[in-house]
Amino acid sequence: MKSLPYFNKREMRKIAGFEFELTRNITIGQYVPTGSIIHRMDPRIKLAVFTLLVISMAICDTYVGNFLALMFACLLFYISRIPISYGLSGVKPAIPFILLLALLQLLFYSEVASGGEVLLDYGFIHITTDSIRLVIVSALRFIEIIFISSVLTLSTSTTQITHGMESLLRPLRTVKFPVHEFALIITIALRFVPTFALEMEKMMKAQASRGAEFGTGAWWRIVQRTKDVFPIIIPLFNVAMSRAEDLVLAMESRCYVPGRERSVSKKYKPSRTDYAALMFCIAFAIVLLTFPFPY
Amino acid sequence: MTEQPILEVKHLQHIYMKGTPLEHHALAGVSLKINKGECIAVIGHTGSGKSTLIQHVNGLMRPQAGDVVVDGMDLADPKIDIRLLRRKVGLVFQNPEDQIFEKIIGDDIAYGPFKMGLPIKEVRDRVKWAMELVGLSFEEMKDRATYALSGGQKRKVALAGVLALRPDILVLDEPTAGLDPRSRNELLERLKTLNKKENMTIIFVSHNMEEVAYMADRIYVLADGRNLVDGTPEEVFVEAEKLREHYIGTPDTVEILAQLKAKGFAVRQNAYQLEEAANEIIALL
Ligand SMILES: Nc1ncnc2c1ncn2[C@@H]1O[C@H](COP(=O)(O)OP(=O)(O)O)[C@@H](O)[C@H]1O
Ligand SMILES: [Mg+2]
């Protein structure tokens, strides 16, 4: 047995073979079919519920309310039988951002959240119990919203999302909003996120085989580092263009005509569980928004 | 004295998306032992792990379990000089023409040598050498635009881009896929010359049994991320039944000879090279 010397994180990643595995970190456009109740929900109801929850989470500003919302988001993972590590991997890249935001809010938001006791008053820095609340609640909100968006995208195929969106947005057609085209654009964009991630992975590997190195130059040598990505970006662009052409051909050869009325192959019909879920979430949103939580 | 193999892979395993619900066991214990100067074919059904395997050879992937040793370098050790490794092992991906990014052929081939920090004179020599090897005239082609090339020519440019690193081992993933028959034969001839004249060790992935029969000294057959059979083409093609179970065919010559034998004709079963097989059949007439 070889003894393992000390490795830093980058080296560990290399050993584990994740150095180029970009797709690992991309959960957008990925669908994890576990067949749970949430997966089987009517996508229109799911989208409506999702919107409702996001709005109420964004507005609710109490500790207890946000704690409840976070618990609820975790519960959704449990019900959908998707490992919560998936949600966490969505949170991870946002951590520096959340921290920075928290710091800025802590230092400079005392005007907005000037209520409560003053805890620290030093030069331009005022920290009050309200500004601390703002910091913690914002961070919680962020995580909650990432969690429920993850549940939504992981439990709903892109086709379902766009069908749902299309039928929820249908009323906008009266004001000449191109609902169908809009939905189609979103479908295609989501559909190709993993494809291009794979394509990019392949390109990085191919160029690395020719001696390219990525992200090794010092960060202040911006020109150098920008040049380093040309060998990936340029071919990727070519690939994207030819994929787009292929897609156009494939769609036209299957009789897609822009602007023409199309029928749908699947009609969604909300079931009793869907209505129950909708009712429950409306109730939950009302509680979050109006209940006078003590903290 | 037994020769030290230039590449040794032992019980290699790889799991994609490890630790996620989508994890996939692509390699479940593959072993290879390749000597210097050999021409090796890796075959197997789509999804059998061929591409995953060969990406381990130049350190794009590191062994999650098992060993990969290239010319004395143990890839499980993160401290090895990866740049040196990538110079030793040239890896040509599937559809390598996608990776061309410079406007001018010469510049694109020179990318690798420049990245190695070689002086301009040496870079030029290497580009020339590589271009002549793949059959592109240096004087005529070096200043041509890359976008105006045919598929076969683009593939040659991409191959030259890797050859310009002067690797000891050349690894190619389905090098002839999508080429017209003429470009295909020409490419195979070039590779054979590289193997015989420059004594370059060649490992290539292929689905075309005729080309495997023609090129390879030895064959490794993968199925579901494991070794199925390996050995010289003769040894491997005898296992036609086993191969067929895993959706792998044998060359037409092998099939024809087997059918003749089944009909009661006395033919050599191992005469799988096109000319040998033809001779066997002529002898019957
Ligand atoms: N980047 C990846 N992420 C997840 N799974 C992958 C990835 N690349 C390959 N696989 C899976 O690993 C298996 C082996 O793939 P691969 O080595 O490309 O096979 P081959 O080249 O023999 O066709 C396949 O089932 C494939 O779906
Ligand atoms: Mg492959």
Image: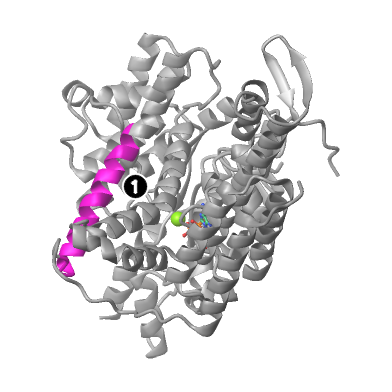
Residue that carries the numbered disc 1 in the rendered image: B95
Q: Identify which residue, A57 or B62, lies in the foreground.
A: A57
Q: Identify which residue, A154 or A38, lies in the foreground.
A: A38
Magenta stretch, residue numbers: A234-256
Circle 1: element type: loop
**Callout 1 environment at 10 Å: few (<14), some (14 to 19), or many (20+)?**
some
* Residue B100 figure quarter: top left
Q: Position of residue B107 (x, y in %)?
A: 29, 22
Q: Identify which residue, A240 or B241, lies in the foreground.
A: A240
Q: Is residue B182 left or right of residue A92?
A: left
- The majority secondary structure of the magenta stretch comes to helix
* Residue B28 figure quarter: bottom right
**Quarter of the image that includes the N terminus of chain B:** top right
Residue drawn 20% across the image and 51% down it: A245
Q: Position of residue B94 (x, y in %)?
A: 39, 48
Q: Is residue B65 left or right of residue A41?
A: right
**Residue B6 visible to an observer of this rendering:** no
Q: Coloring scheme of the render?
A: one colour
**Quarter of the image that includes the C terminus of chain B:** bottom left
Q: Is residue B129 left or right of residue A197?
A: left
The amino acid beneath tag 1 is: Asn
Residue drawn 34% across the image and 58% down it: A187
Q: Is residue A102 magenta?
A: no
